[in-house]
Image (tube, rainbow, N blue to C red):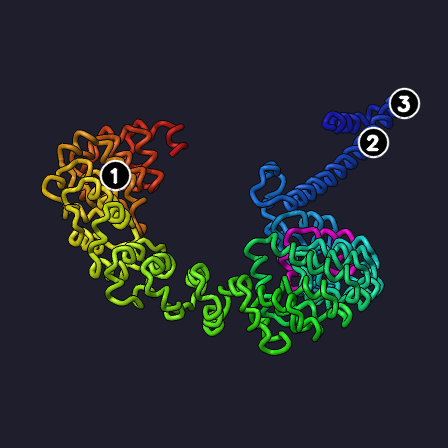
Amino acid sequence: VSVLFVMATVADGKTEYSNYHPSSIEKSETRCQQILECRRQIKNWQDKLTRLLVEQERYYRLAKLRCAAGSTDIQSAESILSWSADTHFTWSDLSWIEKQDKDFILAALESKELPLELKSFDEDVFPLHIRTDPEIFMARVHHESFEVAFRDYAGLVVPRTLCDDKNIMLEVVQRQPMVVESMPDHWRDDPDIFRSVLKHQDLPWKLLQYFSKEIRSDAELMLAVFQHRDSELSWMGDCSERLRDDKVFFINAVDKFRSHCTKRTVEGYIKLRNHNEKPENQVLRYASQRLRSDFDVVMNCVQQWGMNLEHASDDLRRNDKIVMAACTQDYTASKYALPVGLEISFLEHYDFARSIIPYVSAETLKLCLDKHGEDERFCLYAIALNKIFEWSMIPETFRSDPNFVARAAKSLSWGLWEALPLEMKRNVQIASAIVKSDYIDRDVIWDVVHKCPEILSDRKLVIDLIANRRYYADLHLLIVEKSAIDIPNDKVLMLHGVKHHPRLWEYCSDELRGDIDILIAAAEASPDSLYIVPRTYQLDHPEFVACVIQKHRKHCKFDIDINAMYASILREMWHNRTVAMAWLESGGWWIDLEFPSHFREDGEMILTATKNCWTEFRRASDMLKSDKAFVIQA
């Protein structure tokens, strides 16, 4: 192009010469035409370059809207534009016209974090043709924030122009089932729409009321509803009358509901338990009169929820098998038996009375024991499972039997011990059984040891008591004082004791107080007891001191700072690298006054200290600070 401009200048300078040479005129005209053509091409290329720059700028904006902040997919383009990679900033930098551009909106909807305007999609920001665009609307529906934004169905409106599109409605109801409230009537009898709703984990309350009678008469669809994890048995009332009179459907629906509940562990069992507390979930109330008189249907319902007995026919409420099944599941259902008081006669059945023991009141439990109290196993079962059991309910023959009392003590330690007469409290067999109970209280053991110290002659029992962490040290000291065994001189017993309560070391005999095994056990149980370990042993076994330091946090009840243990460690131990590393690894600070200077050149120690607190990096030597790889690692 520069050459052509020079040619044009030369041609202009030779105008005078061309007047005398006709052939030169033709050459000048040719040159001028070439120059004009070059100028046209230059303008075309400049226009094309401008368009390409605009397209490139648009491309980068679209790319930044699609990607999350800090994405490595976007190359640096500072020479072209200085847009931030963050979606929010990029969107805020767009002009008002660009924010109405479909491509920019779709690109922003592909990002993880949406700008506020795209979350609300207010009509003040976006015109009607944007809000009703099928592609934009579906992009909103598929965004991961859609369910969170419209969890309570607030602000979600499907445009009328899109409501007739089945594919759109299938996607929308699957992502937000509450849309069924406002969808057009012609979709309320569409099975595909109904199945799409069931794909969501949370279903709308009163779901079936939003669909037509044809849908609510479809047995297959209704069974799928009761198999859903979010279904309710009260929805049976919204099923068609034909299904509520269908014996096979009714039994299958109840079974499917229970099966999906039992698969959900704690949540499922809580849901089943709550059904007994809600009258609307007593499914038998929704059955037809014919099914309420059907033995199989009523038996199936009362076996799963005993309170359904209320809605059975009068004939079945007088049926012994039905009433017994209902009371076995929930004894409070007995109030619906006919005639009133019929359930009392069932208490004579041993298996029935035994099955209801954990749930009955004190009055009913007393009736059960009056009828079956002569059976030892029945009484022991009542003692173990009924929380409101009282010792006075047991027949006198068993209460005066030491063997029975000893067996009962395994389940009823405190209430039983208080109810026993003094002569039975001094019985070694009963006292030992009380102490061995899983539900024993330290106050009971304290009283047992005072009332019957003879039990402490049993070496195995003493070991079990001393090794129990649930008891306080004062109880262990009482055991040491009251036992007939010479515990202070018994190494095995004292080892068990100091492992759980290092304070017992003070009660060892003079000989055992210097025993290295007992000293190590006490120090490992409580690092604060390290001072009792001889100085020479610590200096000869630095690995033992390191082990005690590492166990400090493990044995602390609360999150106590490791630095509180500093005073318990010998000064000479800080020169040992193993001890120093254990200290740093446990979260201790760098001890300038104790650590030798050559530790500053130990990269591993510096990194460990830096991991606890970044300012400890200043401890590193100049050689380490000049090591690029080490600095990056730190």
Quadrant into which the C terminus falls: top left
First in sequence: mark 3 or mark 2? 3
| Residue occupying image coordinates x 61% and y 37% | 73
- 146 falls in the magenta region: yes
Q: Which residues are the magenta region?
A: 126-152
The amino acid marked with disc number 1 is Val
Q: Which residue is mark 1?
A: 548
| Percent coordinates x, y for residue 50 in the rendering | 72, 40
First in sequence: mark 1 or mark 2? 2
Q: Which residue is mark 2?
A: 37
State how far apart marks 3 and 2 are (Cα). Answer: 23 Å
Is residue 548 shown left or right of residue 3?
left
First in sequence: mark 1 or mark 3? 3
Residue 451 in view here: yes
State how far apart marks 1 and 2 are (Cα). Answer: 92 Å
SS label for mark 3: helix
Q: Nearer the viewer, residue 341 or 216?
A: 341
Q: Nearer the viewer, residue 87 or 430?
A: 430
Neighbours of disc 1 within 10 Å: few (<14), some (14-19), many (20+): many
State how far apart marks 1 and 3 are (Cα). Answer: 112 Å
| Percent coordinates x, y for residue 5 in the rendering | 75, 29
Is residue 1 shown left or right of residue 63?
right
Q: Nearer the viewer, mark 3 or mark 2?
A: 2
Mark 3 in CB contact with mark 2 (< 8 angstroms): no
